[in-house]
Image (cartoon, rainbow, N blue to C red):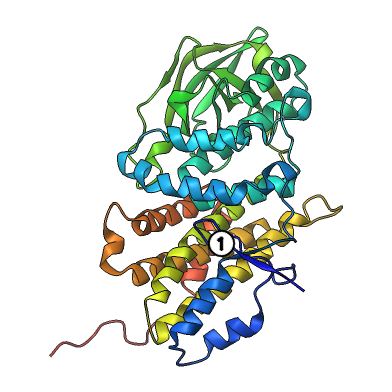
Amino acid sequence: GITFTPYAGSHASRICRRDAPGAYPKSVRGACLSAGVQSCRIVRRVRRTLCVRAERGLHYNDVMDIDLDGLTARLSRLATHYDVIGQWPEKSLKHLEAAHAWKWVIPKAYGGLEFDPSSLLRAYEAVAAGCMSSLLILTQRDGACEFIAATENEELKREWLPRLAGNEIMTSVGISQLTTSHQTGRPTLSAKEDGRNFRLRGFIPWVTSAEKCRIFVTGAVLDDGRQILAVLPTDLPGVTIDPPMKLMCLESSLTTEIHCKDVLLERKYLLRGPAERVLASRSTVKPLVVAVSGVGHAGAMMRVIMIGASKSEGPLVAHAAELAARFDAVRERVLKFTDDLESPGADVPHTELRVAVNDLLMRLGVAVLTYSKGSGLLRQRDAQRLVREAMFFIVWSAPEKVRAGTLARLLENQVPHQRVMDVE
């Protein structure tokens, strides 16, 4: 009783969970995994069944339901272009604006749409499947918006949230110095109390969209170890923004460092603190943003793989089907926890999910180049961009447990008995 419609987007990430209406039948997967599958008819069937979307069973917010697939397609057409030129993805962000993306996390009271966690994460999946630079810009901006929306400082909410909902200004977060970056030695950004205000000294690493922002949300450490979280206007005296970093990927996100030289930050800009851990309370979606984005990116890679498989024979066909099954299994698990976020007592294994997604992305990276062959190395092709962007997930908001777990998965195979080959 399930009717399938062809997926109109440009990736395979709209695969439904097996327990949801529209899931592709196990019999197809089993048939394709059997040894010696070479039939082009089977290949076409694999592609057709992988690249479908059920007419019901997906639970996107109504505002975005008809737009998500088209948004992915529009973003994907521009992604490699902006990757090559390394410039701000202006046209891609126009597509986000048309999809109301700047309103997704803003509370309704301030002109936003206030998506529920599940709808927001599925929308992020769609953006990641189209363009990772746009996804990074959006999620870092949304992170700042969520901090502002969660503060008890009503004046800051009234001043900034309506303008952010209307896309009048850009913002981003610069908090990695409190989480995963530069965690040994002196704090990279220190704060000293100056009457009721604060003096900021140091630098903020890894700030996305830096030169486009009117304000940032950042954190600093006081002499006694307490922390503050605050809005930092970019026009304050002493604030300087470095040129964008030259990166392996995502250069168009204009990520860089911000320096603070004796910056006077008035207390009115304070969001939280001083407190021992100002990031102890965060949005419920934050722990899953990276994992869901990785699933979206994996869907884009699966599309390249399935196109390559349609032109292949023998084991390469069966291997593509097995990769699709692995992708489906990881996506199913991640989205299960996405849907359960608002359930009382939901326990999300964040590290385990991140490691599983990283492992999948590494495997798909090898597969993308395998199926693309030599043309996949060409700078203007999507394949090389997708592989480089997959590496980003190894380091994006990755604490030690995630990095160690990823390496452990990589080293699961037995070490060869003979480490050095004898050469006669």
Residue 213 as seen in the image, left or right of residue 333? left
Can you see residue 132? Answer: yes
> Which residue: 46% across, 42% down?
133
Instruction: Give how far across and how far down residue 192 sits, in percent.
Output: 58, 16
Q: In this view, does 344 lie above or below 159?
A: below
Residue underneath mark 1: 357
> Which residue: 70% across, 32% down?
276
Residue found at the far right of this picture = 344
> Which residue: 48% across, 83% down?
41
Residue found at the far left of this picture = 424
Task: Identify the secondary structure beneath mark 1.
Answer: helix
Residue found at the far top of this picture = 195
In which quadrant is the N terminus drawn? bottom right
Instruction: Give how far across and how far down residue 163 sits, in percent.
Output: 63, 19
Instruction: Give how far across and how far down residue 341 sits, in percent.
Output: 77, 52
Q: Nearer the viewer, residue 101 or 206?
A: 101
Q: In this view, does 165 lie above or below 408?
A: above
Q: Nearer the viewer, residue 197 or 25?
A: 25
Q: Nearer the viewer, residue 387 or 324?
A: 324
All told, the count of numbered labels is 1
Instruction: Give how far across and how far down residue 83 sits, in percent.
Output: 36, 44
- The three-letter code of the residue at mark 1 reads Val
Q: Is residue 295 above or below residue 42?
A: above
